[in-house]
Amino acid sequence: MKIRDDTALRKLAATLDGVFYVGGLPWRNAGGILKPLAAPHVVRDVDRKEVRARLSESGALLARWTDCWNSEESKWWWTCCDDKEYELAGIRSSRARRGIRKGLRNCEVRKIGAGEFANDSFPIHSAALRSYGLGESRVPSRDQYAESVARRAQFEGAEYWGAYHQDEMIAFASCLVIDDA
């Protein structure tokens, strides 16, 4: 498995817990699933024997990765935009354009700092986890959540975004910008 430059990924891995290396690339045990930190178009030629060894080490229940990214049509969950000059006018559906304009009129979307992100997103995050029926022991405290956000913010490619309606956060995104992804 080779990638162009794994420096950014190694810096990211240093800010996280539960990281294991497969083929020189960092993978993370997140919720019992071992998965690469790299974007799917970067992961190539995964050695399944090495993955099995890391599964044993990590205590993860399974490993998940993508082979042959973007080589066939599928119902993949990543959102990709190959157009770096992305503009609203480029969206073909008039209904989608109208929905986006309405959202932008009624909400403010902005990049925010890690502290503001942790404070404003915690109620949404914890309510979502509770709604999944995971049990209280799986819902982090406010301090644990803030600590994980601060740890991730140490990575230079970390970006935090919030969508606000009447000064209340209604949606958020935690993004990792690595190379061109």
Image: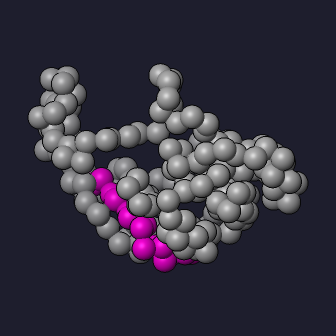
Q: Does the magenta stretch include residue 161?
A: yes
Residues in magenta, as a range: 146-164
Q: In which quarter of the image is residue 67?
A: top right
In the figure, 87 relative to 99: above or below?
Answer: below
x, y (%) of residue 38? Answer: 55, 54
Residue 54 lies left or right of residue 133; in this view the side is: right
Between 171 and 9, the residue placed more toward the observer is 9
Residue 156 visible: yes
Check if residue 22 falls in the magenta segment: no
Return the residue nearer the eye: 93 or 70: 70
Q: Position of residue 126 (x, y in %)?
A: 55, 55
- From the viewer's perspective, is residue 86 above or below residue 6? above
**Residue 55 visible in the shown view:** no
The residue at the point 32 percent across, 41 percent down is 81
* Residue at image coords 72%, 62%: 21
Left or right for 55, reference 18? right
Q: In this view, does 84 lie above or below 76?
A: below
Q: In the figure, 109 relative to 12: above or below? A: above
